[in-house]
Image: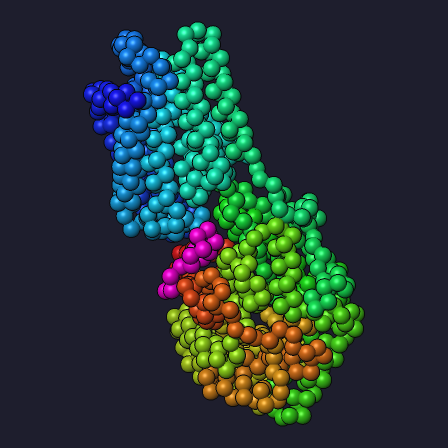
Amino acid sequence: MIDVIASEWYKLRSLRSNIALLAASVAAVFACGLVAYLMGAGFDRQSADERLAFAGNGNGLATGLPIAYLVMAALGALAITSEYSTGMIRTSLAAVPRRQVFLLAKIPGLATVSLVAGQVLAFAMHLVSQLVLGERADQVLMSGQTLGTPLSEPGVLAATVVAGLSMVAVALIGLGLGAAIRSTPGTLLALVLLLFVLPVGTRVLPSPLRDQAGSIMIENLPSQIAGVGGGLLTPLAAGALLVAYVVAALSAGAVVTALRSGRRRVLAVGTAVTLVSGAVVAAAAPGTAGSSLSWGACTLKPAPQDLRCSSVEVPLDWRNPGGRKITLKLAKLAATGAERRMGTVFLLPGGPGGSGVDDLAHKAGSFAQLRHRFDVVSLAPRNVVEPGGVLPHDCLGSGPWLTLPGTRAEFAALAEANRAHAQRCRDADPAFFDTMDSASVAKDVEAVRVALGEDRMNLLGNSYGGVAAVGYARQFPGRVRTIVLDGSVNHVDADSVTDAEHFRVKEQSMRRFAAWCEGATACALRGQDVPALWRRLLREADRSPVPVKGAAPSLSYSGFDLLVAALPSFGQPGDAPERPRWVQLADAIKRAAEGDARGFADYVYQATKSMKVPSWVGVNMTHCLDGLGYATYEDYREGLRRGRKLSPHFGAMRAWHDLACPGWPVPVANPRAPLPADRLPPLMAVGSWTDYEATAAITRKVPGSGGVAYDGHGHGLYLAGKMCPIAHVNRYFLTGEPPPPGTVCKPSS
């Protein structure tokens, strides 16, 4: 046998056409470089947002791989068909009467040449593509990938190596087909059909058949074997399918080589096709879903047609799991991509009181790229505030107008008012009202994970939903794959720790507003010292509240009322260059300084249907159980003192949320606590001018964490459709690796 192998090796290296073929394989490298050049040229002509929507070049092999495959397959085919075309086959079979031995002896030499050439080609195609793209290759795209993926990217090195190895498989397929067909033109035609025509044909099929058929094309198998996409198959199934292609082709060649009857030859080829078809069906069959949920059409309108709804039953009180149950509504946007699904991203809605079901219905576009690899699921949490709930909606949507207590007696009176408003809502169902904490929401999420059949969770905590995400990380660290906190509340550190950063951000918003006023003709305060005017207005209004002209005689705004009404507009000015909320704010400040708080009252009423900002019970029923309030009068006085020291323009603002909780009829159930940092994977922070640092303060406690700071205003950036933050978040969900600290997204021009 060794002599036969040596003889076949001599034939292979002495055949001149083989040298020409290997030289021609450089065309694959050239094709990859050309596509990368054209892609880079097109990329350079795009706007920032258009670049984010660009299709990536992956590892750079896609264009050249079919060309390289054809060269290697032709190399394999010519190893046998050249003997038939020259008549040398008779001499060879006379020397080696056992025909299967004759065919199999060609494999070692062919495999060696194609292995070396395949690896050289694969790495050359990748490196040329990356070099041509240059620095552009690092651009993060909405798909979560980069324009070009370096070998350091998880799975890229493996995919490149597997691509090189797959050329051995293709060469052996060429050998098998050549032995079966016995004609160089006929074999080359069959290879062109297999490697070019069929893959192109699958791309015009309707979905999902297009994705299923594309997954079994040879050119898409290496990436699937490496586990980095390319199709719907698992790595094991893709590897088995590639082996099946080789075995089927060589089996057909071996059978035909051993037969003399043409009729039997046809039978053998048919058997080979059957083998391939069977392998394809087995490899491409979808796995059994582990979910126990039944998904159906959603009743809410408007909603995307592909939004599906379900429900899950959970204990009302997780301390008594066998007791009363409640039903939570769920919604799902299923994975739509042509690649294997990676899992589920679970959206935790903000508020508190928001509905993730509504978020998926109204913000589905934000998840379009993420759905190429993930299902997106959310819920209407137990603390959702919506009509038809267990607790009366009109009660949850109301609350007192908070004042700034000046004495212990006034603090006690405020506590009594808080208790009365809360108790009015609690009376409808005390047991339900008492379980609105975010730790219970986190336990509900774990119940959903079990029902979905997922091993680990990918969480997207939007705004206050980050508190539930942090609660999940505390209670179930082993079930966390990734967590994104998008503009989240810090439920880890005490106010005494976070106040310095909190008020630094607030003071920064004043500086931005004042700088805008200096140059904006639309600013009613242009030419004035805006910070000084604001400080003076707050002091004078606290001494003598500013009346709201045209309203009830008793309605007036204290300095604290003005601060509460104005703060959202300081931080969220509206889109440039108009800055509509800053225009409105400047006008309201000017009118208040002239003795009329109507400007503030009007835009507060537009947003809340109340002449002052109410402290909603539906928000406080979670805030207070989560420990985000003053426990005592001494806590309040110390917090107020600290705020006024840190922030001359917004010092009392922190007190507004915390003053809602004194007198609350239910004790704290979910106090702030550390994260189990040593048991968590790296986390990711997302935020704007107003909330990035507060969010990053949470994630920095976990080693390896990172984030992206949006250099502009906004809140809940993923659902707001901000493309650059979405791109970085999608990439984190794909790879599990957050952006490095210092990553910044610029607003679209």
Note whether residue 618 is visible.
Answer: no
Horizontal side of 19 relative to 713 (left or right) equals left
Question: At x 47% / y 87%, what residue is drawn?
Answer: 645
Q: Quadrant of residue 682?
A: bottom left
List the single residue furthest toward the right.
Answer: 428
Between 203 and 470, the residue placed more toward the observer is: 470
Question: At x 43% / y 31%, what residue is drawn?
Answer: 243
Between 215 and 263, the residue placed more toward the observer is: 263
Check residue 734 for magenta coloring.
yes
User: Quadrant of the image for the N terminus?
Assistant: top left
Q: Quadrant of residue 65?
A: top left
Question: At x 60% / y 76%, what residue is drawn?
Answer: 671
Residue 478 position within the rendered picture, expressed as x and y whole percent measured from the top left: 54, 60
How many marks the image carries: the answer is 0
Residue 642 position within the rendered picture, expressed as x and y whole percent measured from the top left: 50, 86
Note whether residue 668 is visible.
Answer: yes
User: Quadrant of the image for the C terminus?
Assistant: bottom left
Between 55 and 398, the residue placed more toward the observer is: 55
Where is 457 relative to 463, above or below?
above
Question: At x 70% / y 61%, what residue is drawn?
Answer: 386
Residue 677 position within the rendered picture, expressed as x and y whole percent measured from the top left: 48, 68
Residue 668 position within the rendered picture, expressed as x and y whole percent measured from the top left: 65, 77
Where is 467 relative to 654, above or below?
above
Check residue 485 for magenta coloring.
no
Q: Which stretch appears magenta?
A: 725-743
